[in-house]
Amino acid sequence: MKRYAFKMKLKSGAKEEYKKRHNAIWTELKKLLHDAGVRDYSIFLDEETNTLFAVQKVVGESGSQDLGQTEIVQKWWAYMADIMETNPDNSPVSIALEEVFYME
C-alpha cells in the first residue's frame, strides 16, 4: 500500500464549513475514492496558517489526486471552491509532500 500526502489551503474562517461538508461527504464520491483504491484518508488543519494536510493510503497506482477528470470530482471541486484556494478549473491548489520519515 502506498502513502500519499499533500497540502491545500483553506480560506480564513471556513473551518467549520469545511468540516460540515466533509462530514456529509457524498456517497458517490466516497465510492469513487474507494473504487480508486483509497483505503485510509485523513485531512488535518493547521489553524495558524489555514493549511490542510492530507494523507492517504492507496492500493494500486493512483490516489484521489488522479480523479480530476471525473464528473463527481469536478462537482465536488465546484462545491468546495468558495472555501478553499483553487485553480481556474476549481481544483484545489494542491502541493504534493515528500515523505521524509515513516515509522510502522
Image (cartoon, rainbow, N blue to C red):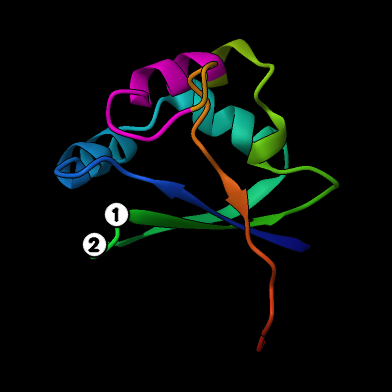
Check the image and report above or below for 102 versus 49.
below
Question: Residue 34: x percent and y percent?
Answer: 63, 39
Residue topped by disc 2 = 47
* Nearer-the-camera pick, 13 or 76: 13
Question: Residue 61: x percent and y percent?
Answer: 85, 46
Q: Quadrant of residue 20?
A: top left
Image position of 62 (left or right of 94): right
* Nearer-the-camera pick, 102 or 59: 102
The residue sitting at 64% across, 39% down in the picture is 64
Q: Mark 1 is on which residue type?
A: Asn
Furthest residue in direction right, as rendered = 61
Q: Quadrant of the C terminus?
A: bottom right
Q: Mark 2 is on which residue type?
A: Glu
* Residue bounds of the magenta highlight: 74-86
**Label 1 with label 2: CB-CB less than 8 Å:** yes
Residue topped by disc 1 = 50
* Nearer-the-camera pick, 89 or 24: 89
